[in-house]
Each structure stands twice: as C-alpha cells, then as structure tokens.
Image (tube, grey):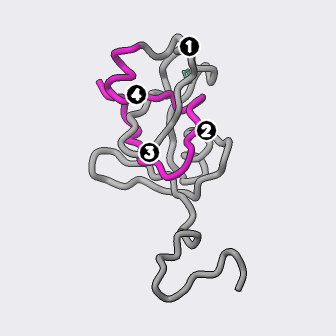
C-alpha cells in the first residue's frame, strides 16, 4: 500500500478539490477561477472575467480596494499607502498587490 492510499474507513484528506477564488458583489457571484499561487486578486479577477479597477498597481492609490469575505490574503508587515489599520479591520485588501493563499471569496467593492 502506498503512503497516500486511503482505506475505506478513513477520510481521504489528501483528495481535495482545487482551491477557487470567487468574486462577488453583495450576494451576486460575478465569477470564479481556479486559485493560482502567486497571482494577485486582480490577476485572478481577469481570469474570472471580472474587472477590478486599477490605477497605480503598486498598493498606493486604493483604487483596487476590495473586501475579503472568506479566506486569507496576507498583508505586508508595513501597510502600503492604500491601506490603513481601520480599513484592514474592515477586511479591506488591495487587489493589485493582494495575493491569496487558497480558497478566497472577495466582494469587489471596498468595505466603506
Ligand atoms: S491600483 Fe492603486 S492600490 Fe491597487
């Protein structure tokens, strides 16, 4: 039996669906795309056929601000000019520099 084999009474933890990045506007699902490690939210949105407006594409202007509903989009140690502590508490992320780590649901609107 191989190390990855699953017996009938075990949960197949190694068998999972591929992570998905979903884009919503309120309750409306606008699009979704398979998670690609290292790609930003904006790049995933393009793959999903969803447009997130951008300007600076460097985390400075806040044009691409979205709201993280589910999942993890890590923040840099030093917040970029486009975010502040209050916005982060409201689950704001910047699509141009935000890189998800797996399954993520994002509302394409800013939290405020
Ligand atoms: S486009 Fe300016 S912060 Fe993302």
Which residue position is annotated with label 3? 71
Q: Looking at the image, is 46 positioned above or below residue 110?
A: below
Residue 98 part of the magenta-drawn span? yes
Q: Mark 1 touching mark 2, by CB under 8 A?
A: no
In magenta, the rendered stretch is 85-112
**Where is the N terminus found, in terms of image quarters?**
bottom right
Q: What is the spatial separation of the Cα atoms under label 2 and label 4, in whole angstroms?
A: 14 Å
Q: CB of residue at label 2: within 8 Å of ligand 1?
A: no
- Kindly state the secondary structure of the residue where label 4 is placed: strand
Measured as percent of width and height from the top left, residue 101 is found at 57, 44
Q: Mark 1 touching mark 4, by CB under 8 A?
A: no
Which residue position is annotated with label 2? 40
Look at 48% across and 19% down and name the residue there: 62
Which residue position is annotated with label 4? 92
Measured as percent of width and height from the top left, residue 53 is found at 51, 32
First in sequence, mark 2 or 4: give its number.
2
**Left or right: where does residue 68 sit relative to residue 43?**
left
- Kindly state the secondary structure of the residue where label 3 is placed: loop
Q: What is the spatial separation of the Cα atoms under label 1 and label 2, in whole angstroms?
A: 18 Å
Q: What is the spatial separation of the Cα atoms under label 1 and label 4, in whole angstroms?
A: 15 Å
Task: Say which of marks 4 and 3 sits in front.
Answer: 3
First in sequence, mark 3 or 2: give its number.
2
């Amino acid at each position: 039996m191989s190390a990855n084999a699953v017996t009938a009474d075990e949960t197949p933890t190694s068998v999972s669906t591929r992570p998905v990045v979903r884009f919503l506007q309120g309750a409306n699902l606008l699009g979704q795309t398979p998670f690609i490690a290292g790609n930003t939210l904006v790049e995933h949105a393009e793959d999903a056929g969803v447009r997130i407006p951008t300007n600076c594409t460097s985390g400075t202007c806040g044009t691409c601000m979205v709201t993280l509903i589910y999942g993890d989009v890590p923040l840099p140690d030093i917040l970029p000019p486009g975010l502040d502590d209050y916005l982060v508490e409201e689950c704001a992320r910047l699509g141009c520099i935000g890189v998800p780590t797996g399954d993520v649901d994002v509302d394409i609107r800013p939290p405020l």
